[in-house]
Amino acid sequence: MAVGKSAIGNQLAQQLGARFVDTDAEVTAQHGTIAEIFALRGECAFRELEARAVARAIEEAADTGTVISLGGGAVLDSGTQQLLATCTVVYLEADAGTVSERIARNSGRPLLAGDAMERWRTLFAARQPVYERLADLVLDVRSGSVPELARRVEDALEQFSATAAGAAPAATKKVEK
């Protein structure tokens, strides 16, 4: 949440000449803002819409170089987790200090109502093990511009692909600064 998935993903797609899909944008284009969906239909309804958007994006991206940005909670769905097993998953790792300014600028996040940073810490603590388990690559995004971070993702993906082509699947690789 607020780590720059959309910005870095879009930049990466541009660098690769690939299609970019932001599943949150797909949901909001069809159903209204996330805040509206939460208010009118609840989180459970949003998660169902989100899971369908992720499944559609992954299905449409099959055998292409599409870059897909998922909402921070999308990975909690077991069906989404199974679909992600067919993809190369990059976890953009940040800490509270990195996201606090972004969260302060964007108050439209329903799960961060009230004490936004305390809520973020709670959500992150629950989600982090899932992010780490699903990730093929982990990129530290605590520093660097969007173009720099996208370049680091691109480099890590090239290295990951080369390793995967020449050997058995490797363990998660952490990409540092």
Image (cartoon, helix red, strand yellow):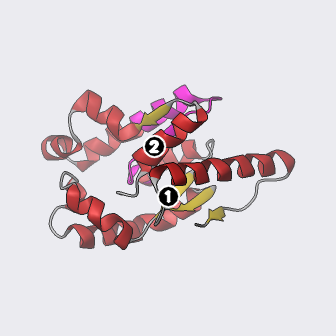
Residue 173 drawn above or below residue 16: below
* Quadrant the C terminus occupies: bottom right
The disc at residue 69 is 2
Can residue 61 be found in the magenta stretch?
yes
Position of residue 171 measured from the top left corner of the image (x, y, whole percent): 71, 62
Residue located 41% across and 46% down the image? 7
Q: Give the residue pinned by disc 1.
A: 92
* Crowd tier of the residue under label 2, counting other residues whose Cα lies within 10 Å: few below 14, some 14–19, many 20 or above: many
Position of residue 11 measured from the top left corner of the image (x, y, whole percent): 48, 41
Question: In the image, what residue type sits under mark 2?
Answer: Ser
Question: In the image, what residue type sits under mark 1?
Answer: Leu
Residue located 18% across and 70% down the image? 115
Q: Which residues are magenta?
A: 53-75
Position of residue 92 measured from the top left corner of the image (x, y, whole percent): 50, 58
N-term-proximal mark, 2 vs 1: 2
- Residue 42 located left or right of residue 83: left
Can residue 129 be found in the magenta stretch?
no
Position of residue 154 measured from the top left corner of the image (x, y, whole percent): 62, 47
Observer-nearest of 171 and 147: 147
- Residue 134 located left or right of residue 100: right
